[in-house]
Image (cartoon, grey):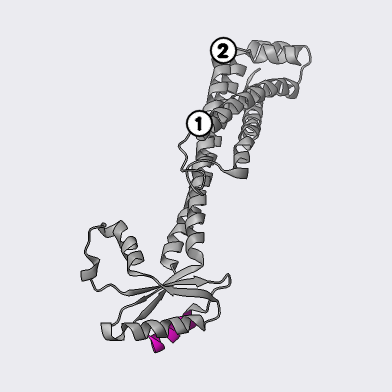
């Protein structure tokens, strides 16, 4: 079998380099596609988790009523099931939050800032609609914000990014299959005379195709393995955000196992593309 495959699919030449380089380049791109997808999803999950069990109450009221409405709001929050704790944010904490947007030198003392209350929800969370109704009755200036408007875009962005990454991986697989098919067609066409001789001595097309497909699959798997290894090394070399960072570009923990499936998938794509091309070409060789 190895002698036949050596004759039909030469060890060197443009076809061999096309398969190795094509599979390696596509595997390298696939690693980065996975890295970007995993990183963005991890970042969205981190942000969403940070906002999931926290909320704020903003109290906008005349100065004479501000303290009374703050006390009423705290009492409502403390007696609401699903809320673990609530505390009034200090003026410095509010200034620190606004400094990100307005700068540190803004004279916040001259601005009529609302009173902010930080709310910590339990895992099951409160009845938000009922809570808003109670607040509107007992503290008309209080507005409960559970950060839904911030969480929803993050979840949608993660879902779209996953879909785009799957589309990108499908395109990479399609290009890999096209490269294998092109190389397979060229190699078989250039060895048409050898194929005719094999048929004369009794070799069936399935036997010839298997010998050919095995060599092409090995080449694609080797190229994809090299490309995957280079891609993983490149991802490891990306800048880190620090040991305590929960996000950032790259793989973390068990996600490092995901790229290991790329050479296997590349070999399967190469086998399917080479097999289909081999039988198509062999039917045209008379």
- In the displayed structure, 210 sits above or below 198; it is below
Left or right: residue 29 versus residue 187 is: left
Q: Nearer the viewer, residue 44 or 211?
A: 44
Q: Is residue 261 left or right of residue 249?
A: right
Q: Residue at x 34, y 75 (%)?
A: 115
**Quadrant of res 84:** bottom right
Q: Which residue is mark 2?
A: 13
Magenta stretch secondary structure, dominant:
helix
Q: Residue at x 64, y 37 (%)?
A: 261
Q: For this rendering, which residue is in front, 203 or 222?
A: 222
Label 1 SS = helix
Specify start and end residues of the magenta stretch as a single range. 129-139
Q: Position of residue 33 (x, y in %)?
A: 50, 39
> Is residue 281 shown left or right of residue 84?
right
Residue 65 position in % (x across, y down) = 30, 86
Q: Position of residue 16 (x, y in %)?
A: 58, 17
Residue in the picture at 60% in, 40% down = 256
Inter-mark Cα distance, 1 to 2: 29 Å
């Amino acid at each position: 079998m190895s002698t036949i495959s050596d004759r039909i699919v030469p060890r060197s030449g443009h076809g061999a380099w096309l398969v190795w380089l094509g599979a390696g380049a596509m595997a390298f791109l696939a690693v980065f596609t996975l890295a970007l997808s995993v990183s963005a999803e991890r970042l969205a999950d981190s942000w969403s988790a940070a906002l999931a069990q926290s909320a704020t109450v903003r109290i906008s009221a005349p100065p004479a009523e501000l303290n009374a409405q703050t006390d009423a709001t705290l009492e409502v929050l403390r007696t609401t099931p699903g809320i673990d704790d609530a505390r009034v944010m200090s003026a410095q904490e509010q200034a620190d939050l606004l400094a990100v947007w307005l700068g540190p030198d803004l004279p916040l003392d001259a601005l009529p800032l609302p009173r902010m209350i930080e709310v910590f929800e339990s895992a099951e969370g409160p009845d938000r609609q009922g809570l808003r109704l109670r607040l509107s009755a007992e503290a008309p200036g209080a507005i409960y914000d559970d950060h839904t408007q911030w969480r929803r875009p993050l979840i949608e962005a993660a879902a779209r990014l996953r879909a785009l990454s799957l589309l990108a991986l499908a395109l990479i697989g399609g290009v890999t299959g096209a490269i294998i098919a092109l190389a397979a067609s060229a190699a078989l066409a250039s060895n048409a005379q050898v194929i005719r001789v094999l048929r004369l001595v009794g070799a069936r097309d399935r036997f010839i195709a298997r010998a050919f497909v095995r060599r092409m699959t090995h080449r694609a798997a080797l190229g994809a393995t090299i490309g995957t290894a280079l891609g993983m090394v490149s991802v490891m070399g990306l800048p880190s955000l620090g040991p305590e960072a929960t996000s950032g570009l790259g793989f973390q923990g068990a996600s490092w196992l995901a790229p290991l499936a790329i050479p296997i998938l590349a070999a399967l794509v190469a086998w399917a593309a080479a097999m289909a091309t081999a039988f198509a070409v062999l039917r045209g060789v008379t």
